[in-house]
Amino acid sequence: MDDWVGSDELDCFHRLAKVGSPSQEPSPASVERDLAGRIFSTSAQLVGVCLTVIGLFRVVSDLKNINSVADNLMAIDALIFLGSCLLAYLALRSLKAERSLALEQAADVVFLLGLSTMVAVCALVAYELI
């Protein structure tokens, strides 16, 4: 390997390997911030998904003259995701670690509630129950 790679490249490779080694565990605070950031961005995206689905339900219901509560349930789901997004944002902006952790955990619970609601609505629509 030394024949075609110089010692400088090997030193750089070894330094990079040490940076990503599993022995350097991230701090719990950075893990919580990362999770709150992921909840924030995903919740915001899912609000958009819910609004898109509501628009599609409206188009289909106007074309086929059917009445469904699925669009109303998706509007509630969009509000749930918006709540999760706001809680995650507040967790990211909080200066106190305890408050940030509590807000992040609340955002996590609300996010899971939103996902569960979305799956339930999708199942009801797929099986034509609503």
Image (cartoon, grey):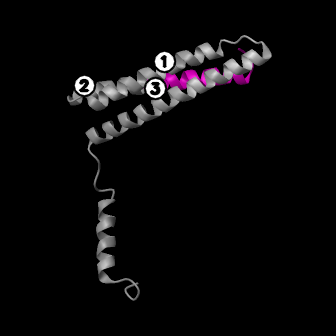
Secondary structure under the numbered disc 2 in the rendered image: helix
Q: Which residues are magenta?
A: 109-130
Q: Which residue is mark 2?
A: 99
Residue at 29% in and 50% down:
25
What is the three-letter code of the residue carrying label 3?
Phe
Residue count near mark 2 (Cα–Cα under 10 Å), binned few <14, some 14–19, many ≥20: few
Spatial CA distance of label 1 from label 3 is 11 Å
Residue at 45% in and 22% down:
82
Residue count near mark 1 (Cα–Cα under 10 Å), binned few <14, some 14–19, many ≥20: some
Label at residue 79 = 1
What is the three-letter code of the residue carrying label 1?
Leu
Label at residue 94 = none
Spatial CA distance of label 2 from label 1 is 23 Å
Residue at 38% in and 24% down:
86
Residue count near mark 3 (Cα–Cα under 10 Å), binned few <14, some 14–19, many ≥20: many
Q: Is residue 102 magenta?
A: no
Secondary structure under the numbered disc 1 in the rendered image: helix
Q: Position of residue 33 (x, y in %)?
A: 31, 37
Q: Position of residue 26 (x, y in %)?
A: 29, 47
Which of pointers 2 and 1 lies earlier in the amino acid sequence? 1
Query: Can the viewer see residue 74?
Result: yes
Query: Can the viewer see residue 124?
Result: no
Secondary structure under the numbered disc 3 in the rendered image: helix
